[in-house]
Amino acid sequence: MEIPSDVQRYYAIGRERSRLDRGAGRLEALRTTELLDRWLPPAPAVVLDVGGAAGRYALPLAGAGYDVHLLDPVPLHVEQAREASATAARPLASVRTGDARALPFDDACADAVLLLGPLYHLSSRVDRVQALAEARRVLRPGGLVVAAVISRFASTADGVAGGLLADERFAAVVERDVATGEHRNDDAVPGWFATAYFHRPEDVVAEVRDAGLVPDGPVAVEGLGGFAADVDALLDDPATRDRVLTALRRVEREPSLLGASSHLLVAGTRPADG
């Protein structure tokens, strides 16, 4: 199974390791961590971080006592994760290259599976359901998958807030994203996202169900916080950060606001009866 060449090129640049350190990415990481803390079973549990990149979530989970295996299709990410794991107080249980649609793990071997990126780049619904079904296969009965998707309207928000709609090429990308969910950077503009699929909230719930999982969510990750002019200024002050996170938590499941969040998370449970 192949990953589109433009996706490999996009991530080979190496920005993913630091993307979550500032701005909207920093808010994304804070909220994702918060939701994982809420949903995951307690340590020590076996967690497969599929599409785990350089280990941004895997390494802290390992440090908290989880038995974490990281899988990613990008060789640079795997190399970065191995380097970080080698110097960690609690290293990852394994790090390898692989594809979310064909997991190199035994049936019913894990308590939780993270898909915090693979569904972005699987343009075919069949492939996305296959990745979710693979996660279900490797889960023990009662186990949990946490999947992230990009909102159908994320590029619209980026275009307006970031001034990108001044470029007619980006305007055409946004028009197609909203109409079909099929995101393409056909002009190979540096810095623009690679081949991807952008979900409507109800679509990811249906995919989780079709994979044989019981869904919980979706939940907005950044929510309206992604529209802040200076996210870092809000997060740098502890009192303000707490108020912002409380406000986002309050409306994280509000149906009328879900699509406004750049990222959504859905949890899916493998039924206890197998």
Image: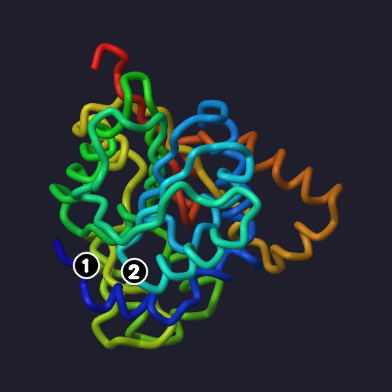
Front residue of 54 and 148: 54
- Callout 1: SS: loop
Please report the residue visible at 85 percent of the width from the left and 56 percent of the height from the top: 237
Q: Element at badge 2?
A: loop
User: Amino acid under label 1?
Assistant: Ile
- Crowdedness of circle 2 by 10 Å Cα count: few (<14), some, many (20+)? many
> Residue 233 location in percent, x, y?
78, 64
Q: Nearer the viewer, residue 189 or 267?
A: 267
Distance Cα–Cα, label 1 vs label 2: 9 Å
In this rendering, the label closer to the viewer, 1 or 2: 2
Q: Position of residue 91 (x, y in %)?
A: 55, 51
Q: Residue 18, position in %: x, y?
A: 58, 71
Q: Is residue 172 above or below residue 228?
A: below
- Residue bearing the label numbered 1: 3
CA neighbours of label 1 inside 10 A, class few (<14), some (14 to 19), many (20+): few
Seen at 48% across and 63% down, the residue is 81
Q: Is residue 130 left or right of residue 250?
A: left
Quadrant where the N terminus is found in the figure: bottom left
Q: Which mark is residue 74?
A: 2
**Residues marked 1 and 2 touching at CB (< 8 Å):** yes
| Side of 33 where 80 appears, left or right | left
Q: Residue sitting at 36 percent across and 80 percent down?
A: 170
Question: Vertically, is 41 above or below 81?
Answer: above
